[in-house]
Image: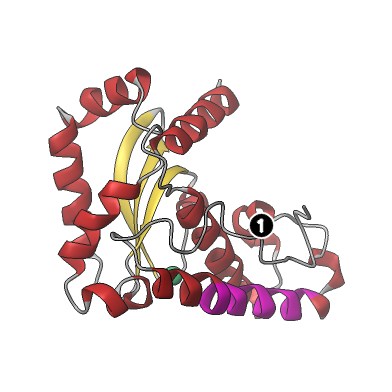
Amino acid sequence: MNFCYPFINTPLPYPYHALEPFIDEKTMHLHHDKHLQTYIDNLNALLKENPMLQKCSLEELLISCCRRPDSLQISIGNNAGGVYNHRFFFDGMSNDDNLSIDDFLLLEINKHFCNFDQFKNQFKQAALSVFGSGYAWLVLDNGRLKITTTSNQDTPLEKHQYPLLNLDVWEHAYYLKHYNVRAAYVDDWFHVVNWHMVSLRLEKWLSFCT
Ligand SMILES: [Fe+2]
C-alpha cells in the first residue's frame, strides 16, 4: 500500500453491505467510491503540481501544515483531511460482533466519562452539536480521553490531539437512510463501532507518547 502520493482509494475492510441494517449499502458505495474518491483525486491533483510535497504522508501533510505554501494551506488541508478522516471513519467500523470493547479501554472510558452510557450520551450530544458538516471524535489529549468536534474536514491532529474514533456527520454519511434525523444515525452507528480498532489506536498513541 502506498502511504504517500499518488494516493489510492484502498478497499473498505468489509463488504459494502456489511454494516446493514445500521448503515446501508448504497450509502457505503457512494461514501467510499464517490465522496472519498473525490478527495483522493483532488489531493493527487494538488500534489502533482507541488512535487516537494509528494513524499509526505497524510499525517505529515496535516500536522506540518505550517510548512505548506500559503497558497495551498486551505486546499491541501481540506483534501488531505478529507482522505484521512474518511479512512479513519471507515476503519473504525465493523460488522464483527467479536470486536467488542476490551477491559482496558472500558476502564479508560469509565475513568474519564464516569461510565459507558455517559460516554455514549456525551459523544452523541457532541455529534448533534456539529453545525453543518464535520465530525465527532474521541481523542487522546495530554494523556486524557476527550470528546471533541471538528468542522468540515479539519482533524484533531492539527490541535496535537491523537484520534481514537470518529463519526462522520456530513449529511452524505446518513441522508439516504436516516434522512435529516442525525440522532437516529448516531444511535445506529454505535452498533457497528470497531472497539478493537479503538483499542489498537489507543495503544499506538500511548506508546508513541511515552
Ligand atoms: Fe463523509
Q: Residue 206, image x and y in percent?
A: 51, 25
42 shown above or below 10: below
The quarter of the displayed image where residue 151 is located: bottom left
Q: Residue at x 34, y 74 (%)?
A: 133
Considering every residue shown, the one lying at the far right of the view is 51
| Residue denoted by label 1 | 58
Q: Residue 195, image x and y in percent?
A: 39, 36
Q: Residue 51, image x and y in percent?
A: 86, 71
Classify mark 1 as within 8 Å of ligand 1 or not, answering yes or no: no
Q: Amino acid at mark 1?
A: Leu
Q: Residue at x 31, y 72 (%)?
A: 174
Of 173 and 73, the residue lying toward us = 173
Left or right, residue 100 beside residue 89: left
Q: Residue at x 39, y 52 (%)?
A: 166
Left or right, residue 188 beside residue 89: left
Task: Mark yes or no: residue 37 visible.
Answer: yes
85 shown above or below 190: below
Task: Mark yes or no: residue 74 visible.
Answer: no
Q: Is the C terminus in the top left, top right, bottom left or bottom right quadrant?
A: top right
Specify the principal SS of the magenta part. Answer: helix
Left or right, residue 154 beside residue 128: right
The answer to if 107 sits in the magenta stretch is no
Q: Which residues are magenta?
A: 33-47
Picture quadrant of ligand 1: bottom left
Left or right, residue 57 beside residue 19: right
